[in-house]
Amino acid sequence: MSKPKIAFFEFTSCEGCQLTVVDTLQIHPELLDAVEIVQFREAMSEKGTDYQIAFVEGSCTRPGDEAALKEIRETADLVVAIGACAHLGGVNSIRNRANLVNVREYVYGEKADWFDTYPARPISAVIKVDAAIPGCPIDRDEFAMAVSHLLQGRLPNIPDYPVCIECKLMENVCMYLRGKTCLGPITRAGCKAICPAYGDGCEGCRGLIGNPNIDSIKEVLLEHGMTEEDIDAKMSMFLTYQVMELEGAQS
Ligand code: SF4
Ligand code: SF4
Ligand code: SF4
């Protein structure tokens, strides 16, 4: 029986999620027995154009990205967004809060007109996405689990409960009791609460849970000494696109 063919693609990203895939394949070489990788710029030079599962990293930030994404969608049976950039728009979406003309000039100076760009979007804003593997970067174990589920004909089982639940199971002392702040109550679990486990508050890289109480977390952050500006900055690192969408302000 032929193995399912898979391909990896990148749009606007740092490629850290694809590096995590390389890392995962070194830890789980058995995955390579189960699939045939036909395109993966991070690890090989071949560019096969026939594949059943497409893993897409990076957000859509230019009009030209749309045609490439649509071609991937037409070819693949399953499209999986990997990482916060593809899943949420990620850090690239921070610029959506500013005037894009100014942003382009700030980054590219007098050559700003050379670069065609528009507000950053998750790939689900352009094409149908069958599943997303969250995180910045993705979690190795979750990626391996997701591939295994996809090969069994089911979608990856990504948690829709907050990081706080994993954090409690890990018996971490809450950041709020340590004089710090944390977005764990509104952020999707699955990372083993790694930031609080190492003494840092969650920044929301896995995106919002299904029913986040944004007003309540803002109240808690204010009570713990953050200003409105601090809160705005904290909520914008990874959550700009989702929060603007909730506020109905996404263009
Ligand atoms: S989600 Fe993070 S690690 Fe992955 S490509 Fe985007 S910036 Fe890089
Ligand atoms: S440290 Fe963060 S994730 Fe952990 S329990 Fe406290 S608020 Fe929740
Ligand atoms: S704790 Fe938050 S910021 Fe850290 S990896 Fe998990 S979801 Fe991302």
Image (cartoon, grey):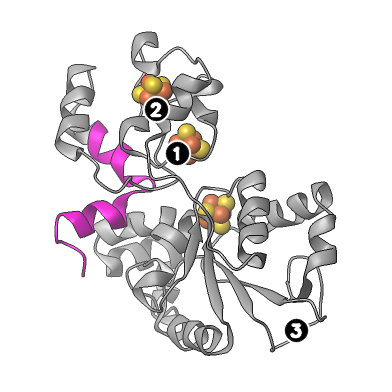
| Real-space CA distance between mark 2 and mark 1, rounded to the nearest whole angstrom | 8 Å
- Residue in the image at 51% along x and 19% along y: 199
Q: Which residue is mark 2?
A: 164
Residue 179 visible, this angle: yes
- Residue in the image at 54% along x and 22% along y: 197
Three-letter code for the amino acid on which mark 1 is drawn:
Ala
The range drawn in magenta is 230-251
The image quadrant where one finds the C terminus is: bottom left
Is 136 left, or right, of 2 in this rendering? left
Three-letter code for the amino acid on which mark 3 is drawn:
Lys
Q: Any atom of ligand 3 within 8 Å of the CB at mark 1?
A: yes
| Real-space CA distance between mark 2 and mark 3, rounded to the nearest whole angstrom | 42 Å
- Report if residue 232 lies within the magenta region: yes
The majority secondary structure of the magenta stretch comes to helix
* Coordinates of residue 149 in the picture (x, y in percent): 62, 59
Q: Which residue is mark 3?
A: 47
**N-term mark: 2 or 1:** 2
Q: Please say if the residues under marks 2 and 1 sit with CB atoms less than 8 Å apart.
A: yes
Q: Which residue is mark 1?
A: 189
| Residue 118 versus residue 28 in the image, above or below | below
| Residue 198 versus residue 9 in the image, above or below | above
Instruction: Tell me the mark number nearer the camera, choosing from 3 and 1.
Output: 1
- Residue in the image at 84% along x and 56% along y: 30
SS at mark 3?
loop
